[in-house]
Amino acid sequence: MPQGQPSVVPDDGLTTRQRRNRPLVVVHTGIGKGKSTAAFGLALRAWNQGWPIGVFQFVKSAKWKVGEERALRVLGDSGEGGTVAWHKMGEGWSWVQRDLQGDNLSNEEKAREGWEQVKRDLAAETYQLYVLDEFAYPMHWGWVDTDEVISVLRDRPGTQHVVITGRNAPEKLVDFADLVTDMSKVKHPMDVGQKGQRGIEW
Amino acid sequence: MPQGQPSVVPDDGLTTRQRRNRPLVVVHTGIGKGKSTAAFGLALRAWNQGWPIGVFQFVKSAKWKVGEERALRVLGDSGEGGTVAWHKMGEGWSWVQRDLQGDNLSNEEKAREGWEQVKRDLAAETYQLYVLDEFAYPMHWGWVDTDEVISVLRDRPGTQHVVITGRNAPEKLVDFADLVTDMSKVKHPMDVGQKGQRGIEW
């Protein structure tokens, strides 16, 4: 429940308007459910504002999040809000030639290739909201250099918001981010033998 | 990252299929961001499955979550997935006559009226996913009886999933729910004087 009242008025020389439109880096981390789900929920607001949205799924399986993908694609194509571009590592990044990926690229190389494209898009100001889904993993595993990510994000031009999800977000990234939520697991049906189910888990 | 492997195989006499399709009560609580956002993200999956979705917003201001509302309405009207019915306490529940609400009903009475409708819809199996947004508050404040909520949810017919959001979800409800995520605040821009902004907060 946002109350609209900041608890501190900062001494940063910015007007309220400048401060209000500051581009944000948002991190959803922790072992609980809802990290990606909340990121895609945020995309609904961005869509409503007419923002171009770029989703980069840094996951191995192309089957994940098919529901969110279909919904965002239908919204993007509706002509009533922002556009949606959806990029999936799992079935091969669309901008990489087919014969250069698949068995020829390791997951580490694929993740790095995804990040290179995000850098190009940030430099070109292609989108206004970036959902870097599960991007905490390649950083956590050292496939993508966290210091470089922070420096690229710090120097990005314009008003581009970036949401990064995934367990084990590096502490440096958490320190740098503007808005961080830790989703903790209180209880999960798999603990008591429930398997994942359609419409809930995917 | 659901792995699909439950850590325990329960001795409940149910087949895997029965267990897989068990209707869930999901609670998103805690003081961090993302409780409602993740609930609306979940609605995208339900929509993709073609489920009828009922959203009940137990909030005072009708202005909240306009982005999610517009997105879900466009999806519901697209004819490509499930339907979406969106009910708002803030501008008066649609099923209550205009002249009976507004100044004539207290927020407590409005919240209770919302819950009465949820009960009717559960009994009639109107929806397959219920998003009871901010419904933890009326329970926390004692406006709606938590024991009654639990008993109604326990005895609901069919396969109806219910997601309840809000800070301070009553402990009894957390104990009863199948899936609970606590969203904790690690860092929020309002802490350093940032005001809420369009596309991010609403």
Image (cartoon, coloured by chain):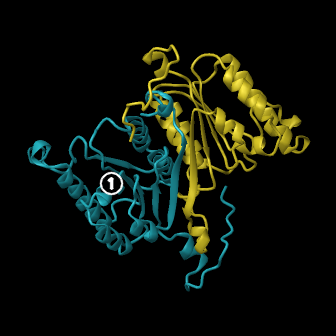
Chain colours: A yellow, B cyan
| B70 w.r.t. A62: above or below | above
**x 51%, y 64%: residue:** B179
Residue B174, position as x, y percentages in the image:
44, 66
**x 24%, y 54%: residue:** B111
Q: Is residue A12 rendered to the left or right of residue B129?
A: right
Query: Of residues B202 and B4, which is closer to you in this image?
Result: B202
Quadrant position of the C terminus of chain A in the picture: bottom right
Quadrant position of the N terminus of chain A in the picture: top left
Mark 1 element type: helix
Residue B20, position as x, y percentages in the image:
56, 70
Determine which quarter of the picture holds residue A125: top right
Residue B53, position as x, y percentages in the image:
40, 53
Amino acid on which disc 1 is placed = Tyr
Q: Is residue B177 rendered to the left or right of residue A94?
A: left
Which residue was labeled with disc 1? Answer: B137
Query: Of residues A98 and B104, which is closer to you in this image?
Result: B104
| B182 w.r.t. B41: above or below | below
